[in-house]
Amino acid sequence: MSLKEKQKGVKPLRILAVASSGGHWVQLRRVMPAFEESDVAYVTVMESYRSEVPNNRFYSVNDATRWSKRGLIVLAMQLAWIIAKERPSVIVSTGAAPGYFAIVLGRLFGARTIWIDSMANIENLSMSGARVGRYADLWLTQWPHLAKSEGPHYAGGVL
Amino acid sequence: MIFATVGSQEPFDRLIRAVDEWAVLHGRSDVFAQIGDSTYCPEHIKFTKFLEPSEYNRVIHEASVVVAHAGMGSIISALEIGKPVVVMPRRGALRETRNDHQVATAERFGVRGRVIVAQDEQELAEKLDYALTLGTMDRVNPEASPRLIATIRAFLDGELGEQESLISLGKLEPHAIRSAPASLAAFRARKA
């Protein structure tokens, strides 16, 4: 029996979708149609984005970057709490730091994970995008010239 | 109305100043800017540090032209509603962002003709004059490419474990899945 058959008539798939603000969030918005039949909770760094997904559970976390170690620790703790509470089957992220931690921590909780590296990373993967590769089950770049046989892979873009 | 935005985070004084000066020169009082953490304080144009999503939406819909840093958020939101967008990339050497990734973004989108690229402040004024002659453009589809949506759906459905089926369905090219070449070879061997 496939996973799809198992889920038929049962609860929808639980997804945790994670993105930082600005371009990362705008790119996540463009893949939302793929989640149509799923039960999605969103995580971002701007409380004001809550109004953009009024029918979903929503969390805002610390807007930490790689420059702030302390900020990253707070962020990781917040994400661990959210993942423990949400127990998602799948975690999807378009970056950056919050998505990296969500995917790394999500693996510990047994979630399957998708990383879609931002379209802004044309010449190289982002720093989080390069490091997250070993934790992401589906590791994607949006630029064919950055794809490699061992990943990241190219399967179209958000635009 | 002209809407200028440099995102909501790092400062980008060069762009805000250029738009401010352009507005004086052209006597335009209908310019509004989201300046983020920019430290330059515009003298002639209206501005705010940060717009909530609903306000951002309202302002960008009202605009006839968008002027922005070469950030994906600004570019995509302008293209989605068919507004001509002039971008000036932030430069790593000027510490406007951590590296020259916006220069690369501007180049890619400029070549495709999707955005109008200004390399510096002088060009920004020229390109802004040009953009004002354009009017509304075609809107880009609000969804990611069908291929990306299909790939994510296949993964959610649990099909992506069965890499061969995806490849054989033509949903993914062999190089598009981790360790695909090996599993594809195994699949072909099994079939034969």
Image (cartoon, rainbow, N blue to C red):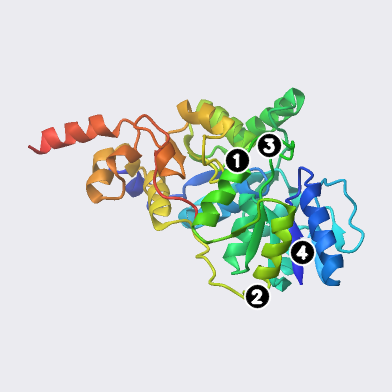
The residue to which callout 4 is attached is: B55
Q: With respect to residue B135, does B173 lie above or below?
A: above
Q: Earlier in the sequence, mark 1 or mark 3?
A: 3
* Residue under disc 4 on the same chain as residue under disc 3: yes
**Label 2 close to label 4 by CB (< 8 Å):** no
Q: Which mark is residue B92?
A: 3
User: Which of the labelled discs sits on residue B133, or is there none?
Assistant: 2
Circle 1 packing at 10 Å, graded few (<14), some (14-19), many (20+), is: many
Q: Which amino acid is tagged 4?
A: Glu
Work out whether A70 lies above or below A62.
above
In the rendered image, the vertical position of residue B80 relative to residue A139, given as above or below: below
- Measure the alpha-carbon separation of dots 4 and 3: 30 Å
Q: Is residue A53 visible?
A: no
Is B19 situated left or right of B133 in this image?
right
Place of residue B155 in the rendered image (x, y in percent of width and height, measured from the top left): 39, 44
Q: In the image shown, does B4 or B163 lie closer to the viewer?
A: B4
Q: Is residue B48 left or right of residue B122?
A: right
Q: Determine the CA span between mark 1 and mark 3.
A: 8 Å
**Residue that numbered label 1 is attached to:** B101
Q: CA distance from mark 2 to mark 4?
A: 26 Å
Image-quadrant location for residue B118: bottom right
